[in-house]
Image (tube, grey):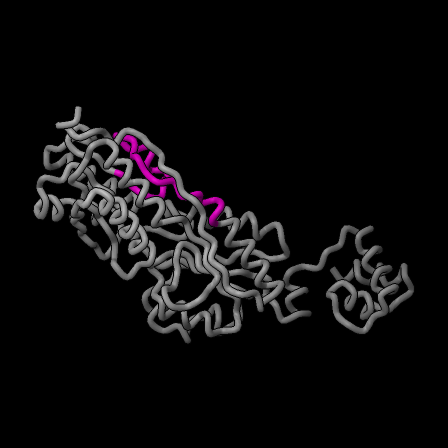
């Protein structure tokens, strides 16, 4: 608002250039004059726009939130990442920054140097959410001079700022819950083995099963969707028909397993117990309501936003990994096996 800048200049008998320098935190002013200008600006309830600040500092004051493109879902409608996005957006909005949201297509992921948000300097930092973002793309982003925070993902052999749930600990709780009910024939429905969260969850399931010296059949899918939950459940039952309980690496696969079991004449939890992971909204609405591991998605988003703001203030911060505890939500999809009732 040039008129406000001019009024401040007139009232303080200084040049408009001096007012502009003070409001945009540029050098070339004495501290006393800078304070007088800023105090007067407060009287007018004046704050420079993000665009004006960006022109003065070569910043965009935008933080990118990126998830991989999924059929039929956007970043905002994804039942898991949409909740993380919402809380991150609220936290970012408390600062001078705003969130820019986009999905990453296969074309972008296969050609990181062409990623326009980086190439055209449209953002000051990025939150990369999800284990399905390839490590090659992540490494390419880490080689730029932009701050990067990984959400619900980790790199095995590279230090990065990460915010995750306790995947291994949560999976251990899921399997222990079923074992405590008397189940001894558990199977796992998993996504791709190269997804970090899948690997950690499988380790947790196996740790619980090893305590009882029990085998644990696993079926992997390319995606972790309701459809893949159906197909992997059918494959698992063909492999291990004695299975009485299912651990699914996310709720969508668990819901698919329940649907497939019903089509095969198995009732949940009478004939089969199922535990999911993530506690998306659909889990509680399902019939039967799904027993699952609750990842505090709001906390993930807030912590990711806080980490990003810290990095924007101090880009030299050493990479740290924050792991947030999860808890078992026992609902109606689990019960003791028939021979234990």
Question: Which residue is located at x 28 percent, y 52 percent?
Answer: 203
- Segment tinted magenta in the rendering: 275-300
Question: Which residue is located at x 86 percent, y 63 percent?
Answer: 9
Q: Position of residue 241 (x, y in %)?
A: 8, 41
- Can residue 24 be seen in this snapshot? yes
- Can residue 126 be seen in this snapshot? no
Query: In the picture, which quadrant includes the C terminus?
Result: top left
Q: Position of residue 134 (x, y in %)?
A: 34, 65
**Which residue of the protein is positioned furthest toward the top in this rendering?**
341
**Which residue of the protein is positioned furthest toward the right in this rendering?**
13
Query: Residue 330's quadrant in the figure?
Result: top left
Q: Position of residue 161 (x, y in %)?
A: 48, 61
Query: In the picture, which quadrant includes the N terminus?
Result: bottom right
Q: Position of residue 220 (x, y in %)?
A: 20, 54
The image shows residue 286, relative to residue 321, as above or below, that is above
The image shows residue 136, relative to residue 97, as above or below, that is below
Q: Nearer the viewer, residue 332 or 66?
A: 332
Q: Nearer the viewer, residue 140 or 209?
A: 209
Question: Which residue is located at x 52 percent, y 51 percent?
Answer: 303
**Position of residue 206 in the picture relative to residue 265 (left or right):** right
């Amino acid at each position: 608002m040039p008129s406000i800048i001019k009024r401040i200049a007139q009232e303080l008998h200084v040049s408009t250039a001096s007012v502009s320098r003070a409001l945009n935190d540029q050098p070339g002013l004495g501290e006393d004059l800078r304070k007088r200008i800023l105090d007067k600006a407060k009287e007018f309830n004046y704050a420079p726009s993000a665009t004006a600040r960006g022109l003065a500092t070569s910043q965009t004051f935008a933080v990118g939130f990126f998830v991989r493109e999924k059929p039929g879902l956007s970043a905002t409608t994804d039942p898991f990442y949409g909740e993380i996005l919402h809380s991150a957006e609220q936290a970012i909005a408390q600062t001078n920054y705003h969130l820019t949201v986009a999905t990453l297509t296969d074309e972008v992921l296969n050609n990181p140097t062409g990623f326009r948000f980086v190439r055209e300097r449209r953002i000051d930092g990025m939150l990369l959410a999800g284990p399905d973002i390839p490590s090659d793309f992540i490494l390419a982003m880490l080689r730029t001079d932009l701050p990067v925070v990984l959400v619900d993902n980790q790199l095995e052999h590279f230090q990065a700022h990460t915010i995750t749930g306790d995947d291994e600990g949560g999976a251990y709780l899921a399997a222990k819950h079923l074992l405590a009910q008397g189940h001894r024939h558990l199977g796992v429905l998993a996504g791709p083995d190269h997804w970090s969260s899948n690997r950690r969850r499988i380790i947790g399931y196996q740790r619980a099963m090893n305590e009882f010296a029990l085998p644990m059949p696993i079926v992997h899918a390319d995606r972790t969707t309701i459809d893949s939950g159906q197909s992997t459940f059918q494959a698992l039952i063909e492999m291990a028909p004695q299975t009485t309980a299912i651990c699914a690496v996310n709720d969508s696969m668990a819901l698919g397993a329940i649907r497939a079991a019903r089509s095969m004449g198995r009732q949940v939890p009478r004939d089969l117990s199922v535990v999911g992971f993530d506690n998306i909204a659909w889990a509680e609405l399902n019939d039967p309501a799904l027993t699952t591991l609750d990842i505090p998605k709001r906390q993930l988003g807030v912590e990711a936003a806080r980490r990003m703001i810290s990095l924007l203030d101090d880009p030299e911060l050493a990479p740290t990994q924050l792991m947030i505890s999860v808890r078992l939500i026992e609902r109606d999809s689990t019960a003791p096996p028939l021979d234990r009732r």
